[in-house]
Amino acid sequence: MSGLSTRQVAPVVGLVIGLVLGLVYQWGVAPVELVNTYPALLRTDYRWEWVRMAALSYVADGDLERVRARLDGLDQDDIADAMGALIEEYAAAGHPADTMRRLTALAEALDVHTSAMLIYQHTPGPSLPPPTTPIPSPSHTPTPTPSRTPTLYPTPTLTPYAPSPLQTPTPELTSTLPTLTLTPTLTPTPTPTPPFLHRLELAEQEQICEPGQPERIKVVIRDERGAGVAGVEIWLMWDGGADRAVTGLKPQYGAGYADFEAEPDVRYSLGVGELGTPLITNLRLEPCPDDEEMGSWLILLEPRSPE
Amino acid sequence: MQAAIGAAAGLALGLVIGWLWPVQYTNTAPAVLRQDYRDDYVVMVAAAYEVEGDPELAHKRLALLDAEDPAAPVVELGERLVAVGGSAQDITHLARLSWALKAITPTLVPYLEGSP
């Protein structure tokens, strides 16, 4: 080795050792305290959950400024992706039209666009009431709501709050709550007949082969007596788009008729009215049995009998 | 002696580098959110429960804040908002979620149907 003496090497070795020790201490032993973080630092799935809950809060309280404040600082792509996924999921699950309209309005306000929004953008629907009451879902109905009676207020037997996990409720809670004499306000009422559009279902689906003719998805809507129903709004949806038709605009085919042009290799969903609930999913053109050309579909929708 | 001086200088340099470029925490969990964000998180869980009606999902979200007692932040925040005269709608949502999680307290009972 050439002229490097111990006197020259020692400081360098010491510097390296000291540097390593310093970094180990700062990064490993006493790193930056992980407290007081903010939503933008959340893991991706938690950030999406944050956006999703902010959107659902908007459905519950209608406060746009509050949502904006909650989403402030988050990446616009995150917001768009999470909102888009939420709307697509809710549309596919058939959530109420009012909920979908609120989500769509919020998405538009946040400059988010997804194909499932198209229906609600073009169907203004009834004016939205103030969202002061919860929208119960079927799984929510068992939750009793206490009536506002004098017996509702705490009696001496009511034990103080005792933290307990959901899965293992403590005996105090289960034994104490009934002493409040909470009266469910869910009064059984006769189930009204659902509106006509809510009762529509697929009655028949037939492939039609018309060589030389453009492929179409033809829809016929009939009432209980078999008569065509005009004026019904039909939505054909696919990944990235949607089309709308109204029955009765081609009277030569009957009052309940409407059709759409269709493309091969595209998966369609068919919905009726403003519900956004697809009555038919995964609909795609198929080749005719005796021909290489694609066939059209004739779809007959009729109301199921009220139960 | 020179080695010791070098080590001291290196240690100081390491500390400065570690302080200037700390460990980057970008994948944090809700549990380490600042208190006001934690409160907002709990309010959002309660509001989302109003729409979704799924207590299990709400429980799962709250467990990210307090795995041992997920209902505790809901009750604590609800009672705190009652004490300071917070939003009646938020308190109502928190009260309903507390009820669903079997953690309702006397303070929150009057809000089960809305503002008292």
Image (tube, grey):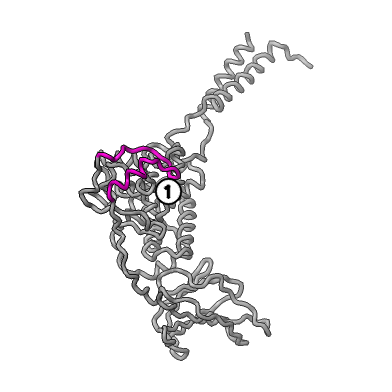
| The residue stretch that appears in magenta | A156-181
Q: Is residue A92 inside the magenta stretch?
A: no
Between A139 and A93, the one nearer to me in the picture: A139
Q: Position of residue A203 (x, y in %)?
A: 50, 80
Chain under disc 1: B
Residue beneath disc 1? B58
Instruction: Name the residue at 61% across, 16% down.
Output: B7
At label 1, which amino acid type do we have?
A: Ala
Q: Point out the image quarter for the C terminus of chain A.
A: bottom left
Q: Does the magenta run of residues contain A178?
A: yes
User: Residue at left 33%, top 49%?
Assistant: B96
Residue A130 lies, in percent from the top left, at 28, 59
Residue A5 picture quarter: top right
Residue furthest left in the image: A150
Name the foreground residue: A2 vs A155: A155
Q: Secondary structure at mark 1?
A: helix
Which x, y percent locates residue B54?
42, 53
Residue depicted at x 39% and y 56%? A140
The secondary structure that most of the magenta stretch takes on is loop
Towards the viewer: A26 or A97: A97
